[in-house]
Image (cartoon, rainbow, N blue to C red):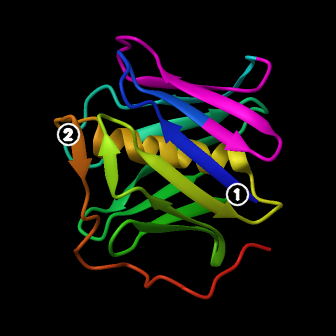
Amino acid sequence: MNVILQEKAIALRPTYTITTPNGELSAVKVWMPIPPKVEVKGPQGDIVATLKGPLFSFFKPKWTITLADGRSYIFHCEKIIKKTFTAVSPTETYTLYTHRSLHFSIFKGETQIAAFTRNRMSIGSGHTYSIEMDSNADAVLLTSMILALNTLTEDKKDKGLVGVEVGHIGPEDRPINTTWQPA
């Protein structure tokens, strides 16, 4: 399944369009919330996920991802230098690995279920994530993890008119699997 997550280039607050085979979702960072909050809405405008950020954190900010079906995950940076993130619930764990350049992968346990890339050039805030995931993967949860990652890493940056990213150049926690294909 292919999913595109597009951040609006010029907006008063971060706004995203998420294109999936099952329809188009939208996400908006709620205006001036304390703590920060992002709402993901379905095609009919119903809230399918809510992301709540930390009130205050220096090193490892934690985001709470709550899905419409009641499942809740804690998303945080597990390894700062290697940029490895986890989303943990009482029953399952997802790990988001940052690879060299602008490549990422998501694992459920020890099984890879998604891979995605981010655009190298952006106008304003307009990041685009191209996501390939298994057909049985939870698209709302995975895109919520990517939204939390984008909010954690990109909201603090000074956004000029045109941005050029080199991506991650540090050590990797897990090397990229270039042969992986979605099931």
Residue 69 appears in which quarter of the rendering? top right
Q: How far across and how far down the image is residue 8, in percent?
A: 45, 30
Give the residue at x 67% y 59%.
Answer: 92
**Residue designated by label 1:** 2
Viewer-proximal residue among 178 and 93 = 178
For badge 2, the amino acid type reads Lys
Locate residue 61, reporting x and y percent: 32, 42
Q: Identify the residue shown where x is 76% and y is 60%.
A: 1
Circle 2 or circle 1, nearest the eye: 1
Contact between labelled residues 1 and 2, with CB atoms less than 8 Å apart: no
- What secondary structure is marked by label 1? strand
Residue stretch rendered in magenta on the structure: 18-44
Is residue 109 within the magenta segment? no
Ranked by sequence position, the earlier of labels 2 and 1 is 1
Q: Nearer the viewer, residue 72 or 180?
A: 180
Residue 19 belongs to the span the image colors magenta: yes
